[in-house]
Amino acid sequence: MSTAIPTIEEFVRSDYKYGFVSNIDTETLPPGLNEDIIRAISAKKNEPEFMLNWRLRAYRHWLTMTEPRWPKVTYPRVDYQSIIYYAAPKKKPQLGSLDEVDPELRRTFEKLGISLDEQKRLAGVAVDAVVDSVSVATTFQKDLEKHGIIFCSFSEAVQKHPDLVEKYLGSVVPHTDNFFAALNSAVFSDGSFCYVPKGVRCPMELSTYFRINTANTGQFERTLIIADEGSYVSYLEGCTAPMRDENQLHAAVVELVALDNAEIKYSTVQNWYPGDKEGRGGIYNFVTKRGIAKGRRSKISWTQVETGSAITWKYPSCILVGEESVGEFYSVALTNNYQQADTGTKMVHIGRNTRSTIVSKGISAGHGQNSYRGLVQIRPSAAGARNFSQCDSLLIGDKCGAHTFPYIEVKNDTAQLEHEATTSKIGEDQIFYCNQRGISKQDAVNMIVNGFCKEVFRELPMEFAVEAQKLLGVSLEGSVG
Amino acid sequence: MQPILEIRNLQAGVEGRHILKGISLTIQPGEIHAVMGPNGSGKSTLAAVLAGREGYDIVSGEVRYLGQDLLELDPEERARAGLFLAFQYPVEIPGVNSTYFLKAALNEIRKHRGLSEMDAIEFLGFVKDKIKLLELNEDLLKRPVNVGFSGGEKKRNEIFQMAVLEPRLAVLDETDSGLDIDALRVVSNGVNKLRSPQNAALVITHYQRLLNYIVPDFVHVLMDGRIVRSGGKELALELEERGYDWIAREQRLAA
């Protein structure tokens, strides 16, 4: 068997297709972090007083914190004084006029397969495009407005809907939450904002597309989605970055709020530059995502397909406060070459009869290290709570690793919890069996990996499920064809 | 007529062990050849080398399949060219639906033959009769490949796949092992239905009983990596009666 292992490894060598740099005229603030930089960011965004104060509070708190070392990932310390905290394409369009988007930016997004042209865009998806620190375009805003839905960049929301921002910003992830959330709160420069009013079912998929372009910058965006009573929204984020030898930091915060009978479905296809085959470069993806199912019978569902980044550290979580509220987490995390991922979820059951489901699929190839870390917490008030967790790991080759760290805390004895876990390996015998039926090695690996991830893919919006499958294929692509 | 398979003085091994020590065998269209032999004689190595399994080293010799150098081809190229191996131990592939798997396989082979690819509906129509031939339940098509199949189902599934893929040369590696008499009959019946003047089969088995159902044109006895005796179907009966030892003794005497 051992003689055959290199052949499998050939497949896990991949080429990153989004590694280009666009030549966009960019305005940046000098690198480094201090109160002046934060004041400068706030001033550039013309923010109201409450925002600046919030940022400064976060910054001062951040200074008292240390970078967490508990994740099962290793990387050199980040020099926070060498990062550029603000970079924006110079030619910013007037809000709402897509025609004025810099043609170079437009081409960048065309290359990524995202058209900012509403006529050409697949029907049914509205896009907010974020480059480096700012949102450059949001499509279909007018159509959405007819339904009372607000979908815009975070900066625009701060200007036009300060009351909503002030009410909900930091209400799910407070600025004191953790090191990276505090940093984000201090310096975040844009992101997406969405508010779906009472009883409205959002008629199209909303999506944000993040692109890091400028060298030495960090991307710190913030997304806030509020689903008012009885509303529904499905939201998707995607992301890519140029290939560079140095690491770049991405520290985002996502907050979701679901009121009575509201449902938020949040899907991520994360494809940041993963670094090269020797592990040089790549994005540090240190992200805090949390949703509060505040209302009765509300529901928050996270689906993530994580194929990019040198290091991924994120735990999209659900705080289940409302009675009978539901939290879901469906995840595929792939680590290839020298990528590391420590990801999972937290399900905090507070309300009575709350339910949660966790399905995590980790795929490790090359020298990749993949950890599932998850917390299921049943608070004393959560009578009748239920959780089902399933954590499966798939290994490709013999130099990678899969790890599972499940934490279960139960403080109410009427709760029911189930936990299932499996680890399997794509065997040479499986590949050979496929070969012997005429199926190439690469198709065989894709077939097996896609089969392994099926339960998660079917949670993704239709067209993105296809994209995610292709992305996994590309991430595992090798030189044999 | 061009032979389907010509093996000339094939020597091969695995992990430094020399297993096949000079095999020569020619299979013409329409013929069924049986290779029999005791455990460890090299039967499964022969099947693995023909199918192109990784990890086997070819020491010397030549194998021509339909006139081309078989050993030059990747395993999937051999399969697409119509060489089918019914596995002794069919492999489970969790998460991969049987229909999806077999349709992908069939379409690879059809592409190779210059035929158009079949869509899901055509495919289901096409396999319906074949699944009946093997007396398999249709819901097998909805299950992951070989997962949760009984031993007998796995073997029948191999022959079902063979019926769908319509190979020029089928290599059956101990397809009878672990089968009860009813399953043996079903499997053999499947193989017999697929016999044609254009195709051929190489049936590898330890026991003679399979050859009561799949009647071979030639029987070869493999011992210690060599074909030590070839004959007609009656050779199999003689082996059944007398075991392998007498051939071994004769071999030693001759040496």
Image: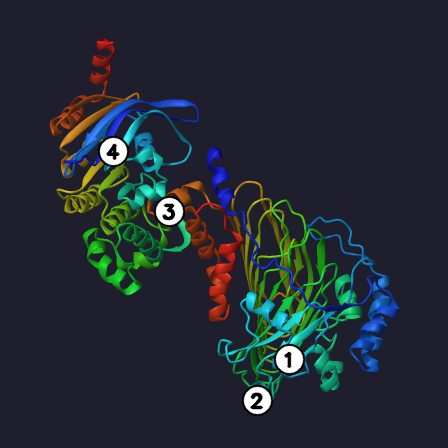
Q: Identify the mark nearer the N-term, 2 or 3.
A: 2
Kindly identify which residue carries mark 1.
A100
Q: Is residue A385 at least partly visible in the picture?
A: no
Looking at the rendering, which quadrant does residue B18 occupy?
A: top left
**Is residue A452 positioned above or below B65 on the image?**
below
Mark 4 vs mark 1, foreground winner is 1
At horizontal 12% and vertical 42% (from top left) the residue drawn is B197
Q: Chain of mark 1?
A: A
Q: Position of residue B176 (x, y in %)?
A: 24, 38
Residue type for callout 4: Ile
Kindly identify which residue carries mark 3.
A434
Work out whether disc 3 and disc 4 sit on a shared chain: no
Q: Chain of mark 2?
A: A
SS at mark 2 in the image: loop
Residue type for callout 3: Cys
> Do the residues bearing badges 4 and 1 touch, measured as CB atoms within 8 Å?
no
Label 1 crowd bin: few (<14), some (14–19), many (20+), radius 10 Å: some
Kindly identify which residue carries mark 4.
B204
SS at mark 4 in the image: strand
Q: Chain of mark 4?
A: B
- Please tell me the numbered disc located at residue A147: 2
Q: CA distance from mark 4 to mark 2?
A: 70 Å
Q: Position of residue A143 (x, y in %)?
A: 56, 87
